[in-house]
Image: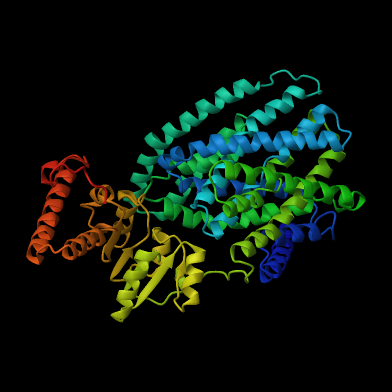
Amino acid sequence: MSDLLLGGFVMLGAALVMVLVFRRFGIGAVLGYLIAGILIGPHGFQLISNGETILEFSEIGIILLLFIVGLELAPARLMRLRQAIFGLGLSQVVLCGIVLFLLIMATTKFTLAAAIAIGLPLALSSTAQVLPMLQSSGRLNTPMGEKTFSILLFQDLSIIPLLTIIAALSRAPQQDGGQSGWLTAIYAIVAIAGLIAAGKYLLQPLLKVIGRIAERELFIVAGLVAVFGSAALMELIGLSSALGAFIAGVMLANSPYRHELEADIDPFRSLLLGFFFLAVGMMLDINVVIENTSFVVGAALALVAVKIAIIFGLGKLFGMETYPALAMGMLLSQGGEFGFVLFAEAEKAILIEPEASSLFGAIITVSMAMTPFLMLLTRMFSEGGSKTTTDHEDPANAERASVIVVGQGRFGQTVSQMMSAAKIPLTLIDINPEQIDIHEQFGAKVFYGDGTRVDLLRRAGAEQADAVVFCMNDKEFGPERAREVIQSFPETKMFVRVYDRRQLVVLKGLGIVGMKRELFESAIHLARQTMYAIDIDESLIDEVDDEFRQRDCDRLEAQIKFGGDMFAGAEFGFGGDLPEKS
């Protein structure tokens, strides 16, 4: 027990000091954890010796990370990303793998099989490093963030074929009872289908029962049972345990309790991910790096350069703008944690020597250490060389206000400025860091976060507020999220900016006090101005205005009555018009 406590003290203490130092210089926490691990590990001051054991334990952090990401991805959204996952993701893994394999063949004396076993794993990136960066910067739900996540998800899926390739090339004696890659793939499909069915017919009803008992701890237990059960099943059939956790998250993505689960699990995820990077640092053999400094550094630079170039080119090919494509390339340029796993398998298959496994493990670690500096570089590009943005405040630091305004784009700015003119105390929230920085330049305080999340609204004081006004441009804001907010804060009035009449129809009848279509009033006012300018009688303009509004209300009622059918109530339209979308 004393050794355990002392080890925990040393690891957490070293991590605390190094992360504070690196955060102070705006570099980020990952490099701090890596350096702390190097210093206290068996190749540093030898304060901790069991780096591999810690690494295995801390991989739970990656499992919890993928679970939390899955919670944010409802199946409908995942289907929307299928082209990016199987188009962009497949292209990245194949092209990067082939180019890196050819580069190893051209510059080293490795055999063909060894070059394949080393080059293909180097195509993978670090989920444990990249996803927290996207989440902390608020970019996971941006187009660039979604494409980056799609690539990472396909990389997880590619573990099966990569393991199959290594097994096919193996020079190790054949063992009885081995499982073929095709059989593993079949098992994987059956397992995923079974998990989805279990989520729908077992887990969701169980959560409803727990909801009636109203014991919050049971939600956490149920969530963790789903996470570890799914992860263990995938591990059992030879697939990535992180993929199993991700599926568990997707199963709960439509649950009204997902945000509470995320808020409770996230601190454990952050701590375990820190331990993961500590362990990676401990396992880095400094002697290998020192003896082969030029090769390790040169190979890490080549790895990063090749992946940036290929991923940037693919991003442009898939319709991305120059800066987001470059940022995505830099973000995914490092080697990944699954590289360590695949190198170990290649070593067992007698494709590479243990020294080569250690050498390329060091190259992956060095490439991970480069990523925070690359992200600083992309930030400077995006800001035109200006100073880096400061950390944005959490709404928990806001003074209690009468109204919480979520979203500070053009619509939200107008709403908040009018309320400010009436001297109403406000808390402003936005998920876009650049938007927050612009407001701060004009002296306005905007807090950072996803204002549609119940846990964040609770920290912002929604229970004490008179009203919450959702002004973000989000046509995916649907009944489930709205109902969750209303149920959590029944005394707080809720107002919503809606994208079009379709969104208004699905949100009608939930208890939302007010909804306004974002273009409706401006279109009416422009029509009035036009008619007035061409000398239409003002009384006729008023009559048409009133008639149009009444018919629009009648049509909306008909569309709601017939389950959102946009052709319902067509008789209330003016001659020959189509069902309008605004």
Which image quarter is the N terminus in? bottom right
The x, y position of residue 447, in whole percent, is 46, 69
Q: Is residue 332 visible?
A: yes
Q: Is residue 210 left or right of residue 57?
A: left
Q: Is residue 28 left or right of residue 217?
A: right
Of residues 254 and 209, the one drawn nearer to the viewer in this rendering: 254
Q: Is residue 152 visible?
A: no
- Colouring scheme applied when the structure was drawn: rainbow
Of residues 436 and 485, the one drawn nearer to the viewer in this rendering: 436
- Name the residue furthest right: 291
The x, y position of residue 114, in whole percent, is 81, 31
Of residues 151 and 1, the one drawn nearer to the viewer in this rendering: 151
Q: What's the residue at 35%, 51% (across, down)?
A: 475
Of residues 530 and 229, the one drawn nearer to the viewer in this rendering: 530
Q: What's the residue at 36%, 49% (across, down)?
A: 476
Considering only vertical position in the picture, is 464 above or below 494? Answer: below
Considering only vertical position in the picture, is 569 above or below 101? Answer: below
Considering only vertical position in the picture, is 510 above or below 192? Answer: below
Q: What's the residue at 15%, 41% (across, down)?
A: 576
Q: Is residue 258 left or right of residue 320?
A: left
The answer to which quarter of the image holds residue 152 is: top right
The answer to which quarter of the image holds residue 543 is: bottom left
The x, y position of residue 439, in whole percent, is 46, 72
